Amino acid sequence: MARWTIFFVLSVMIHLSVFFLPSKFVTTDMAGSRLISVDLETYSVPLSEKATPGVETSPLPKKTPQKALSAENKPFPDAVPIETGSFKAFEEPGNMDPQPEVVAPGAENKSLGGLAVPLVTDADTVRRVGPVYPLASRRKGEEGEVRLLVGVGKNGRAASVEVVQTSGYPALDDSAVYAVRRWLFAPGSPEKVIVPVIFILE
């Protein structure tokens, strides 16, 4: 009877230990009546850290290389020296008297069908107005020689101006005619003279 009482008491103790210690398993060694407790430790597994999204950096704007100025984009020079064989063509008309081409007195112009019309000389003129070299003609590279047959009036002014040899460019011809119409000839000059005007770009 006492033996059963011991087993009963042990059973109650085991149940009580399990009730008050839920985190431990209690086993009994029936042979030696020893209590062996096993601790159960719980480990929390850390959640994997969320990958921090990388900060998107916008690429630096590409530098646009400056286009080199081409020859076509360069501004046309304001002043271009223009040389003529007989007298200078100026950018702006003025009362200027450039040195003319040296022409022997009485020299005849052979382009007029043998007519004895002399070339103008320095002594034949009192005032010469240089022709304007048109800007459009300079940009296009237009060059040429204009020969004008000028009829000299009694007042010393050009009574008539006629193109007898064209430069091939109407703008150059018109500029030469406009300038020579403003010339003033000396008294006693021939009634008709040939005035050569040469437009040359340097």
Image (spheres, rainbow, N blue to C red):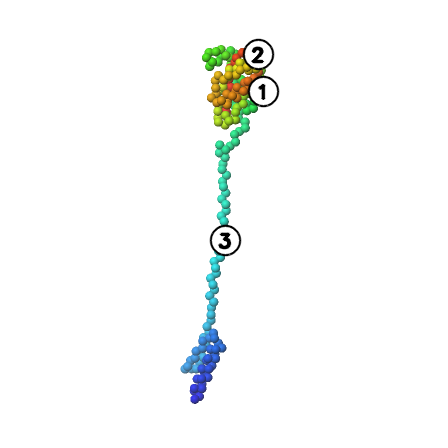
Whether residue 120 is visible to the viewer of this picture, yes or no, is no
Query: Disc 2 to disc 3, how far (Cα)?
Result: 95 Å
Q: Which residue is mark 2?
A: 154
Residue 151: x percent and y percent?
A: 53, 14
Rendered residue at 49%/77% (across/down): 20
* 32 lies above or below 83: below
Residue 96: x percent and y percent?
A: 57, 20
**Mark 2 residue element:** loop
Say which quadrant the N terminus sits in. bottom left
Q: Residue flagged by tag 2: what amino acid is it?
A: Lys
Q: Which residue is mark 1?
A: 95
Q: Residue flagged by tag 3: what amino acid is it?
A: Val
**Mark 3 residue element:** loop
Q: Which labelled disc corresponds to residue 156?
A: none
Q: Quadrant of residue 178?
A: top right
Instruction: Please state which of the two labelled residues, at mark 2 or mark 3, is closer to the viewer.
Output: 2
Verify CB contact (< 8 Å) between mark 2 and mark 1. no
Whether residue 166 is visible to the viewer of this picture, yes or no, is yes
